[in-house]
Amino acid sequence: RIIAEEVAGYQTGVQIKGSTVSLTIETLRETADKWKIPLGAWKAFRAVAFRSLLFVGERELISDGGDALLRLNAIEFHGIFSPMLAAMGDGTSMEEWLAETDILADVELRKDSSEGGKRETSSRDKPVFSGTFT
């Protein structure tokens, strides 16, 4: 939901030179800092954001929120998010990050849910993963 709600719709420029497409999202660093993305995972977060926007589509992410990502099949989802998970480190590091951002997620993501629109329900109400990271 971070990408769907805090990255999609905030791109400030697209530049095309030959076969290279550059997408500028000025709030990306601010979003990474807000959500305590580790410095070692910054490039992976940037890549996941770009791949999500490109593969799922900015319009779908804006209109459907995190549900647009949850409609991907397992291979598509892992293809987009695996680099981020690998960059986050081991299971203990991931669990520490989740614990550090838990209150922020409750405040930010539930606040958006209570304001209506695409954020009516929280994906946190139905866990996608249950268990521990190894």
Image (spheres, grey):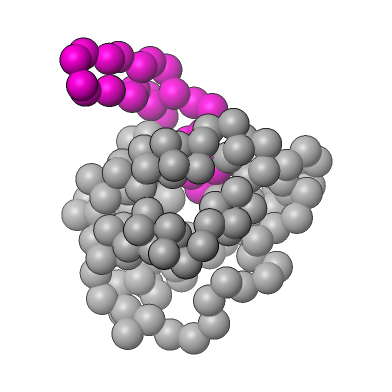
Q: Which quadrant, please, contains the C terminus? A: bottom left
Q: Is residue 15 magenta?
A: yes
Is 126 situated left or right of 41 in this image? right
From the viewer's perspective, tell me whether residue 77 is left or right of residue 88: right
Q: Quadrant of residue 31?
A: top left
x%, y% of residue 47?
30, 44
Task: Examine the structure image and report whether residue 130 is included in the region drawn in magenta.
Answer: no
Start-end of magenta stretch? 2-27
Query: Observer-nearest residue: 64 or 123?
Result: 64
Q: Residue at x 60, y 49 (%)?
A: 68
Q: How many marks?
A: 0
- Tell me if residue 23 can be seen: yes
Q: Quadrant of residue 124?
A: bottom right
* Residue 107 in sight in this render: no
The residue depicted at 47 percent of the width and 67 percent of the height is 74
User: What residue is rendered at 41% in x and 64% in y?
Assistant: 75
Side of 64 relative to 130 (left or right): right
Q: Residue at x 24, y 61 (%)?
A: 87
User: Is residue 28 placed above or below 78 in the rendered structure?
Assistant: above
Can you say whether 43 is above or below 15 in the image?
below
Indicate left or right for 134 with 119 as reference. Answer: left
Give x and y (percent) for residue 82.
Answer: 32, 62
Q: Is 22 drawn above or below residue 99 in the view shown?
A: above
User: Where residue 20 sits: x, y (%)?
Assistant: 21, 23
